[in-house]
Image (cartoon, helix red, strand yellow):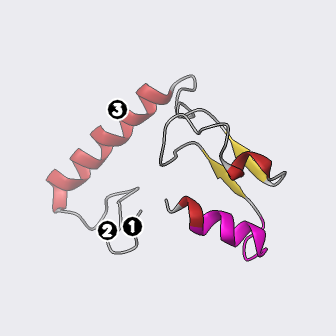
Amino acid sequence: MDEAALVAALESKAIKGAGLDVFETEPLPQSSKLWTFPNVLISPHNADQVEGWLDNSINLFVANMERYLAGGTDNLVNVVDVRRGY
C-alpha cells in the first residue's frame, strides 16, 4: 500500500475510510498520520487469527486442490488476480 497516497485520498475525501492491518513500517509508528483519521480502522497485523481460521484455510486449500486435479483452474475459488493486485 502507498501510505502517502492513502493519506491524500482520505484528506481529499476521495474515499470514505479504510480498514488496515498492514503498513509500510510494522508496527505502524505513532507518528503516522493514519492514526489521526476517525474513519480509519487500524488493527494489529494478526486480524486473521480468529477461531477456526487455520481449519478454514486448510479446507479451502484441499477443496481447491481437488478442483484443480479434477479439471484445472477454471473452478478454483479465492484466486488472486495478479493483474489487479489482489
Neighbours of disc 1 within 10 Å: few (<14), some (14-19), many (20+): few
Q: Earlier in the sequence, mark 3 or mark 1?
A: 3
Task: Give the quadrant of residue 85.
Answer: bottom left
Residue plotted at (49% across, 29% down): 53
Check disc 1 and report its element: helix, strand or loop: loop
Residue 29 placed where, x, y %?
60, 38
Residue plotted at (53% across, 30% down): 46
Taking the view exactly as shown, the residue that stands out farthest to the top is 51
Q: CA distance from mark 3 to mark 2?
A: 22 Å
The amino acid type found where label 1 is placed reads Gly
Looking at the image, residue 5 lies above or below residue 45: below
Neighbours of disc 2 within 10 Å: few (<14), some (14-19), many (20+): few
Residue 8 among magenta residues: yes
Residue plotted at (33% across, 75% down): 83
Residue 86 placed where, x, y %?
42, 62
Q: Earlier in the sequence, mark 3 or mark 2?
A: 3
Residue 5 placed where, x, y %?
58, 69
The amino acid type found where label 3 is placed reads Ile
Taking the view exactly as shown, the residue that stands out farthest to the right is 38
Say if mark 1 contacts mark 2, CB within 8 Å.
yes
Region rendered in magenta: 5-16
- Residue 6 placement, left or right of 41: left
Q: Which mark is residue 85?
A: 1
Q: Which mark is residue 58?
A: 3
Residue designated by label 2: 82
- Residue 29 placement, left or right of 68: right
From the image, state whether disc 3 or disc 2 is nearer to you.
2
